[in-house]
Amino acid sequence: MCRNIKTLSHFEPPASDAEIQAAALQFVRKVSGSTKPSKINQAAFDEAVHEIGHSLEKLLNALQIQGPARNREVEAAKAKARAAIRYPAKTTAL
C-alpha cells in the first residue's frame, strides 16, 4: 500500500472531508501510476478521485468499530517514534 495513505477509521474526531479526498487522490495516483495526469486524462482522473472519495466516506460511516477511538496526537507520536528507530539521525565525527 502507498505509504502516504493514512488510516482514517476509528479516530476522534472523525476524518475530515479533506483527509478523505487526500486519501482518494493518493490511491488514484498509485493505481494510475501518474501524479499529474495529462490534459486528456484529467477528467477521468478527477472523476475517479471523486468516486473513490465518496466510497471511502460511505465506508467510514458504515464501519462498526468496538473499543475506544484512537487519538490522533498519540498515534502521531507513535509513528514519530517508529520513524526515529527506522531512520536514526546521522552523526558526523569531527
Image (cartoon, helix red, strand yellow):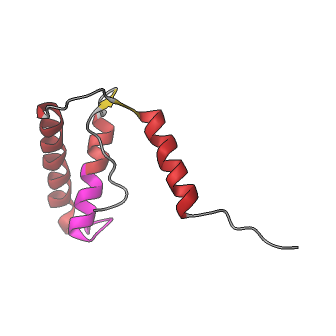
- Residue 57 falls inside the magenta stretch: no
Residue 28 in the image, given as x and y percentages of width and height: 22, 59
Residue at 19% in and 68% down: 40
The answer to whether residue 53 is left or right of residue 88 is: left
The answer to whether residue 40 is left or right of residue 7 is: left
The residue closer to the viewer here, 43 or 25, is 25
Is the residue 71 above or below the residue 77 in the image? above
Image quadrant holding the N terminus, namely bottom left
Q: How many marks?
A: 0
Q: Quadrant of residue 32?
A: bottom left
Magenta portion: prevailing SS class: helix
Residue at 33% in and 65% down: 35
The residue closer to the viewer here, 10 or 34, is 10
Residue 73 in the image, given as x and y percentages of width and height: 48, 34
Residue at 32% in and 53% down: 5
Residue at 48% in and 44% down: 78
Is the residue 53 above or below the residue 88 in the image? above
Residue 17 in the image, given as x and y percentages of width and height: 28, 35
Q: Quadrant of residue 66?
A: top left
- The extreme front residue here reads 67
Image quadrant holding the C terminus, namely bottom right
Residue 33 in the image, given as x and y percentages of width and height: 26, 71
Q: Quadrant of residue 85?
A: bottom right
Is the residue 25 above or below the residue 1 in the image? above
Image: magenta residue range: 24-39
